[in-house]
Image (spheres, rainbow, N blue to C red):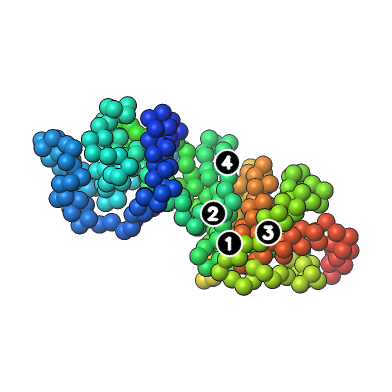
Amino acid sequence: MRSNWIVYPEAQARLNETGLAERIEDANKGCMLRIRGSTSDYDVKNLMEDGELFDAMKADERAVFKQTLLNALKDASVWRIMRKDGEQKEKIKPEDVMVLAGDSAWGVLEGSELFDFKRFGFANVLEFTGTVGAAIERAAHSSGAMRKGYKWESRWPDGRVVVNSITGSMHADLRIYQNDVTPYETFDPFGNRVYYRPETDSDRRVVAAYHSTEPHLLVALLKYSDQLGLKPAALEDGAAKTIEWIMSLGQSGGSCAEHFGGGRPDDHYKFFINWRVPLPQLDVNLRADGICVNFLYTEYGGRYNIYVGQQKELVIAYVNDEQEEKLNPKKAVSFMPEEIDHLIKGVLFQSARGLGRVPGRQLIDILTYRYSEKFISDQKRFSSY
C-alpha cells in the first residue's frame, strides 16, 4: 500500500505560483481531503468504468488516457528514481494509478480544470494530475495525529535531505521516524521527468521502541554530547532554558495515567550507572569496537543499540539477540552532531505532549540530576565498584 508522497521544491513552487497550494491547504483545513485506504486492481477498474471523473475529456482522449494507465499497471511499469546509491526501480501500484488518473485531485480541481494542464503551466496531463495528486495525498497524511511530535529537517554531507520526527505510537510507545525527502531525479512510469515521487521503503527509517524508554534515550543523548565534547545550546547552564521551555508547555495527557506521575527522585541515578562506559564506535564495516550498554528496549525481542558512527554521527540501530554485531543500515537511523539540540528537545517535547508514557517532569528531573552535585558524588561512588 502506498502511504505517502514526496513533493520536490520545483513542484511546490509551481503549486504556489498557480494558487493550487493554497487551495489544497484550504481543503485540508476544511477536512475535505480523503485518506486513501488499501487499493486494488479492482478499485482501479471501477474508477475507469466511472465516466464522471473523465467527463471533461474528449471521448478519444479519454479512451487513450484510461488505456495508458491500465497498460502501465498490467505491465508493472516502474518509477525510476536516481538515488545516491544508484537507480531505484519502483513498480507502479494501484494507488499510483488512482493518483495519476486524477482521482486524488478531483474535488480540489473542478470540472474542466481537472485535466487542463496547460492552464497551470505543466508539460502534460500526467505530470499535472500526478503532481497535484501527490501534494494532496501528502497534505492528507501529514495532518494525522501520529505526526504531531517534534519535527525538523536536516541536510547530510552527502546531499541527502531528511525529515526527522520524535513522537509516539497509538499505544504511546516511543517512535523516531526518519524520512529521506531528497529531490532525486525522477521519471514516472511513462518516462516523464517529474518533480515528485512516491515514498518507498528506501525512504523510510524508524525506531519502534517499547514504552517508557524515553529516559534511556535522553541519557544516551547526554552521554553522546559529553563523549564528543559537544556544546549544545539545549544544555547550557545545566539545561536551564530548555527546562524552562518544556515546563512552559505544561503536561498534555494522552492515553496513559502515567503522564501525571513521575519517577522517584532518588531513582534517577539508576539511568547513569553505566555513564562511564562510552558509546561504542562503528568502523567502516559497521562493527562496534566495544560493548553497548546504552540501548532501547522493544516489545517483541531485540533492541536498539546506540553507537557513534564514522562521521561522529549518532546511530540508533536494531539488533536481535542472535545476530553478530554488524549492523544493517536499513534498520538504523542516524543524526549528525549538529542535530543534538533537536534530539534533546524532541524527546522532552514528546513526553510533555503525552505522546509517550513518560511524563515531562521525570525527564526534567533527570536533567536536573545530571547537573547536580549528587551526580558527581554518585559517579565517584560507582567508579569504586
Which circle marks residue 250 in the picture? 3
Q: Earlier in the sequence, mark 1 or mark 2?
A: 2
Q: State the residue in front, 328 or 3.
A: 3
Q: CA distance from mark 1 to mark 2?
A: 9 Å
Q: Residue at x 42, y 32 (%)?
A: 16
- In this view, the residue farthest toward the front is 30
Instruction: List the residue tagged with mark 1.
Output: 355
**As shown in the figure, which amino acid type bears the numbered disc 2?**
Lys
Q: Earlier in the sequence, mark 3 or mark 2?
A: 2
Mark toward the viewer: 3 or 2: 3
Q: Earlier in the sequence, mark 2 or mark 4?
A: 2
Residue 178 is at least partly visible in this image: yes
Q: Residue at x 67, y 69 (%)?
A: 260
> The N terminus is located in which quarter?
bottom left
Give residue 127's quadrant in the image.
top left
**As shown in the figure, which amino acid type bears the numbered disc 1?**
Leu
Instruction: List the residue tagged with mark 4.
Output: 154
Give the secondary structure at mark 4.
strand
Mark toward the viewer: 2 or 4: 2
* Numbered-mark total: 4
Q: Residue at x 28, y 44 (%)?
A: 106
- Where does the image place residue 362, in percent across and percent down from the top left? 72, 65
Say left or right for 286 vs 187. Answer: right
Instruction: List the residue tagged with mark 2.
Output: 148
Give the secondary structure at mark 2.
loop
Tell me if mark 1 has few (under 14), some (14-19) or many (20+) residues whose alpha carbon lies within 10 angstroms of its own: many
Q: Residue at x 34, y 38 (%)?
A: 131
